[in-house]
Image: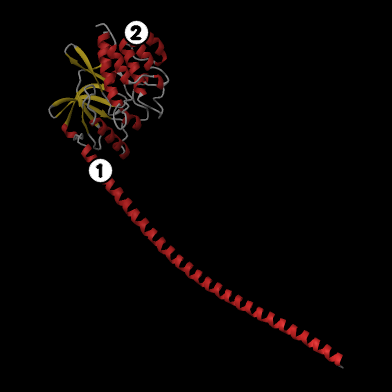
Amino acid sequence: MQEREQNLQRQLRVVQERDQYSQSQLTEFRQREQNMQRLVRELREGEQNSQRQLTELQRQLREIGQQLTNSRGQVSELQLSLSTAQQTINQLRNQGARDWVIPRDEIQITEKCLGRGGWGSVNEGTYCGCTVAVKEIYELILSPHNIRLFEREMNIASKCRHPHLLQFIGATVDEGSPLFVTELMEKSLRTLLEQRLLSEREIRIISLDVARALNYLHQKKPEPIIHRDVSSANVLLWRQGDQWRAKVSDYGTANFMQQTMTVAPGAMIYSAPEALTSNQTVKVDVYSFGALLCEMCIRELPDPTRREEQVVLVTNAVFRGLVRRCLQRERGTRPTMHGIIDELEDANVSS
């Protein structure tokens, strides 16, 4: 009995020990449960804070979007105001630049014809009591675009001042064919060449006058002016003592006529190879100058089919070399008008 009692006591102690261990584990599990519940509460609180932060950020984003929309509207209003102001400024500038406009009824045209071209005729006339040349562009297709283009070219011509450019007096801008009024010269270079051969001294002086006029146009700011119609018909002459001096005409209408007529202006016999393309520079005028100088030397109109043959006929070596360089097919190898002036000024020619 005593042994059995001892066994039962041992078993009881084992059960008590196990119970104590289970109680310890249960306490630990409860502690863990409490920790997990605390973590869950913290996570839920964090989620709620995040949600509040997200809601606040979304509200701020909406406010920024509204501010951006308002700013864009203000920018559009400012751009519209700027555009309106610029248009007003341009209109004022154009009004100020149109001091060259002449009322048609102030121009009297006589029946004395000074010349005709493919685009119009030139007659002697009077303006403000002075004898003038009046050019009528009769084949112009009148449209708002062409009228604006013509006015732009007249604005350019009115700002050109050079002793060897024909003096531009003014033009009409009404619904009729434009009238272009200039000073009246004695004759054209072509007319003089039809009458007689020029001396080397005359060739040098006249060609220098033409070169200086073209150089002035080519140096014009902000953009060079390309004449595009250099020819003996557009070189007009006046007497200075016993010497003919030259002025270049049509510098105000050549670009306008090229853009409004079905064919390019200017006689093709003077034209550079690139003259009928949109890729033009001042070197087209250099080419035409070479053809003109050759014409002055040999008293023959330029003939594109006989270029080299005509160049050989130039007896003066300085003139011949200059003509040859001006007539190069590659425009980059042609001289500038400034270089041509230097060469002609240094040339020794007989009288």
Give the answer, above or below, for where 278 lies relative to 311.
below
In the foreground, 343 or 2? 2
Residue 132: % across, % down: 18, 25
Disc 1 marks which residue? 91
Q: In the rendering, which numbered label is found on residue 283?
A: none
Residue drawn 36% across and 59% down? 70
Q: Earlier in the sequence, mark 1 or mark 2?
A: 1
Q: Secondary structure at mark 2?
A: helix
In the foreground, 95 or 47? 47
Drawn side of residue 26 relative to residue 322, left or right: right
Name the amino acid type tagged 2.
Ala
Residue 201: % across, % down: 25, 9
Within-10-Å neighbours for mark 1: few <14, some 14–19, many 20+: few
The reply to whether callout 1 and callout 2 are in contact (CB within 8 Å) is no
Within-10-Å neighbours for mark 2: few <14, some 14–19, many 20+: few
Q: Secondary structure at mark 1?
A: helix
The quarter in which the N terminus is drawn is bottom right
Disc 2 marks which residue? 317
Residue 177 in sight in this render: no
Residue drawn 25% across and 43% down? 91
Q: Name, please, the residue furthest toward the bottom.
A: 1
Residue 81 in sight in this render: yes
Q: CA distance from mark 1 to mark 2?
A: 54 Å
Q: Name, please, the residue furthest toward the left.
A: 129
